[in-house]
Amino acid sequence: MTHLQQQLLAVKHELPEGVRLVAVSKFHPVEALMEAYEVGQRIFGESRVQELQQKQPVMPNDVEWHLIGHLQANKVKYIAPYITMIHSVDSRKLLQEIDRQGERNSRVIDCLLQLHVAQEETKFGFSFEECRAFLEEGDWKELSHIRICGLMCMATFTKDTQQIRQEFATAHRFFKEVKAQYFAKEDSFKECSWGMSDDYPIAITEGSTLVRVGSKIFGERVY
Ligand SMILES: *Cc1c(COP(=O)(O)O)cnc(C)c1O
C-alpha cells in the first residue's frame, strides 16, 4: 500500500458511522486520485471548474464529484451534466442558475448552502441572518431541479481549538433550527459539511456528516 492509501484509510477509520469522507484532490494529479480510488474512495472534492473538467472524463464513471470552492454562475453549465453535489452555494442567483442547468440536463442537483462563520473577511457564504432571510423568502421552493441537502462551512484559520469548536457548534445549532423550520419533512436535508485536515476531529463531534479532507491524504498542495 502507498503512503497516500495508508493516510486515506487512517482518516476513514476515524470517522464514525454516518460521516462520509470527501477526498479533496484539488491540485493533485489523476494518478493520486486513482490511488485513492483503488482503496475504495469514491467521493472527490475539487474547488475549480477547469480542473474538474480535466479530471472528470479520465476518472472512472462511478466517482461522485463534489464542488467545494467558490462557483461563478457562468461556469455552472460545464459541470451540470455530472456534478453530484455543490457545497458552495452562496447566493440566490447561483442557486437559480444551478436549477436552470439542472433542468437543461434533466437532473436534480444536490446543493449545500455555504455559511460564513469564520472571522476572516475573505471567506464566501451567507451570514446566519442572510441565510434565514433567504429561506424565509421561499423562492427556492419553486426550483425543481435543485435539492437543498444541508449546510457547509469553514472555521476560522486558527490554532484556537475552542474557537473552532464553537464555530462548528453554532453552525450545527443553526442547522437544527433551519431543519425544524423549513425542512422538517425533507429527509434529504441532512448534511453538515464541515471539517478539513486540521479540524475534522473537532467537526465530527459537532455534527459533521461530510468531512472535506485534502492535504492529510494527498500531502501538501503545490500551487
Ligand atoms: C482545500 C479545501 C479543503 C481541504 O483542505 P485541507 O486543509 O487540505 O484538508 C476543504 N474545504 C474547502 C472548501 C477547501 O477549499
Image (cartoon, rainbow, N blue to C red):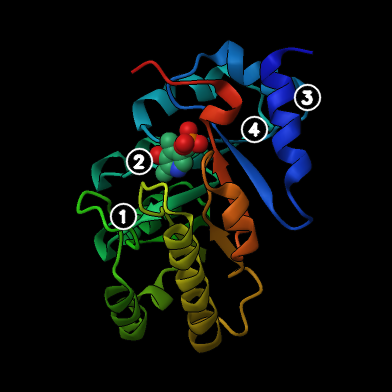
- For the residue marked with disc 3, what is the amino acid? Val
Which residue is located at x 43 percent, y 20 percent? 221
The residue indicated by pointer 3 is 39
Q: Secondary structure at mark 2?
A: helix
Tell me residue 132's x, y (percent).
34, 80
Q: Secondary structure at mark 4?
A: loop
Query: Which of marks 3 and 2 precedes in the sequence?
Result: 3
The residue indicated by pointer 4 is 63
Q: Is residue 145 visible?
A: no
Q: Secondary structure at mark 1?
A: helix
* Distance Cα–Cα, label 2 vs label 3: 31 Å
* Foreground label between 2 and 3: 3
Question: Callout 2: 10 Å neighbours few (<14), some, many (20+)?
Answer: some
Q: Is residue 137 above or below residue 53?
A: below
Query: Which of marks 1 and 4 precedes in the sequence?
Result: 4
Which residue is located at x 64 percent, y 57 percent? 204
Query: Which of marks 3 and 4 precedes in the sequence?
Result: 3
Circle on res. 77: 2
- For the residue marked with disc 2, what is the amino acid? Lys
* Distance Cα–Cα, label 1 vs label 3: 35 Å
Query: Which of marks 2 and 4 precedes in the sequence?
Result: 4
Q: Is residue 142 visible?
A: yes
The residue indicated by pointer 1 is 97
- For the residue marked with disc 4, what is the amino acid? Val
**Horizontal arrangement in the rendering, residue 161 relative to residue 94 (left or right):** right
* Foreground label between 4 and 1: 4
Which residue is located at x 25 percent, y 60 percent? 93
